[in-house]
């Protein structure tokens, strides 16, 4: 049972009132420290989200700056392998086969399958 419920505020001794005032001051200080800690935590969380967004943007920018995206390289290899039999055939000219590979690749880019 706390001192206020037991005696009522008006019936407190001077010592009890002093203790109550001290406790109130300590609680206010702790409340301020708690608010400050929460504010710092919120700031850190925001900073972390900003950092993650910057890293993601940097990755996307690096991918966009490359001559060809990773997906583009994979698609080009797949198309090239699709024409492997023609490359192995001695009667087909290498240059004409690469024109087909290029056409298929450009078709995939234009269809939106890959970024330009």
Image (spheres, helix red, strand yellow):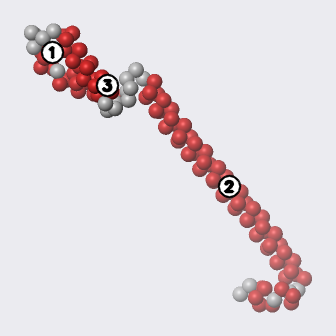
Q: Nearer the viewer, residue 48 or 16?
A: 48
- Determine the CA span between mark 2 and mark 1: 66 Å
Q: Viewed as shown, does residue 112 lie left or right of 34?
A: left
Which comes before the other along the chain, label 3 or label 1? 3
User: Which mark is nearer the camera, 3 or 2?
Assistant: 3
Disc 3 target residue: 73
Which comes before the other along the chain, label 3 or label 2? 2
Which comes before the other along the chain, label 2 or label 1? 2
Q: Residue shown at 65%/49% (left/top)?
A: 43
Is residue 74 in view? no
Quarter residue 5 falls in: bottom right
Quarter residue 72 falls in: top left
Residue 104, compared with residue 52, is above or below; it is: above
Disc 1 target residue: 87
**Which SS class for mark 2?**
helix
- Determine the CA span between mark 3 and mark 2: 47 Å
User: Which mark is nearer the camera, 2 or 1?
Assistant: 1
Q: Viewed as shown, does residue 100 lie left or right of 46?
A: left
Q: Residue shown at 37%/23% (left/top)?
A: 68
**Which SS class for mark 3?**
helix
């Amino acid at each position: 049972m706390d001192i206020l419920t037991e005696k009522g505020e008006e019936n407190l001794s001077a010592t009890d009132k002093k203790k109550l005032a001290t406790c109130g001051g300590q609680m206010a200080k702790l409340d301020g420290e708690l608010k400050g800690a929460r504010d710092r935590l919120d700031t850190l969380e925001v900073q972390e989200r900003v950092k993650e967004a910057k890293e993601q943007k940097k990755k996307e920018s690096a991918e966009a700056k490359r001559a060809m995206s990773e997906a583009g390289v994979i698609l080009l290899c797949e198309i090239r392998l699709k024409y492997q039999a023609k490359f192995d055939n001695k009667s087909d000219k290498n240059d004409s086969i690469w024109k087909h590979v290029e056409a298929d690749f450009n078709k995939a880019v234009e269809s939106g399958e890959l970024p330009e």
